[in-house]
Amino acid sequence: MPWYLPLLIMLARCCDVPLGTIRMIFVISGQKWTAVILGFFEVIIWALAVGGMITNLDEPVAVVAYGLGFAGGTWIGMTIEQRIAVGLRIIEVINPDPAVDVTARLRDLGHRVTRVEGSGMRGPVEIAKLVLKRRELPAVLDRVREIAPEAFVSVERADRAQGAPGPAAPRAARGILGRLGGVRK
């Protein structure tokens, strides 16, 4: 076995595994053609890596390189996925402080927010829901912590959002708000 073959096997896995991770993100977000193209390249690279390992199963270095490549590829894929931040998120803020109007403050920042009155363990609560692009999530969560530090905040993935937005709605907010009960200013 050539000395460089384990390195090539490891590098191939460090390429195909991240492609698989990213492909699944596009599958989940409904971007079929992007997922199909990524899948094409992913499986070609995978076949080359598996072929190199299988033809050298008697060489422990080849098998270890395959495993290291998978592990490294998983880390690389997760890192890339965090950076591209594809998709939408639903933020639900449950605010127990009546002196703080989370909905109004978030609307002042340009977000479409649905407000629901709720009942918590200690009395009335404001429930504010909004949909946004995933890459906007950290900044919005920071703002929510500033606005209402006592609030309970949950974040969910939104597969797709559709519907008729109002004139000032951010693109990521369109659609899901209709299913959550509409938005009133």
Image: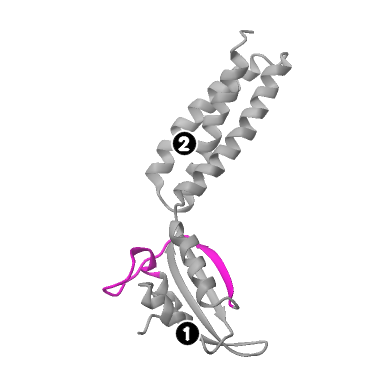
Is residue 34 depicted above or below 93 in this figure?
above
Asked if the stretch drawn in magenta spans residue 126, the answer is no
Asked where in the image residue 183 lies, by quadrant, the reply is bottom left
- Looking at the rendered structure, the kind of residue marked 2 is Gly
Query: Is label 2 in a helix, a strand or a loop?
Result: helix
Start and end of the magenta stretch?
A: 151-175
Residue lying farthest left? 167
The residue sitting at 41% across, 74% down in the picture is 177
Mark 2 and 1 residues: CB-CB less than 8 Å, in contact? no
The residue sitting at 64% across, 14% down in the picture is 55
The image position of residue 19, as x and y in percent, is: 50, 37
Q: Quadrant of the N terminus?
A: top right
The image position of residue 162, as x and y in percent, is: 37, 66
Q: Residues within 10 Å of mark 1 (few under 14, many from 20)?
A: some
* Observer able to see residue 181: no
Q: Tell me the tag on residue 39.
A: 2
- The residue carrying mark 1 is 101
Q: Residues within 10 Å of mark 2 (few under 14, many from 20)?
A: some
Is residue 149 depicted above or below 86 in this figure?
below
Residue lying farthest top? 2
Q: CA distance from mark 2 to mark 1?
A: 46 Å
Q: Quadrant of the C terminus?
A: bottom left
Is residue 91 depicted above or below 34 in this figure?
below
The residue sitting at 43% across, 61% down in the picture is 160
The image position of residue 62, as x and y in percent, is: 67, 18
The image position of residue 16, as x and y in percent, is: 53, 32
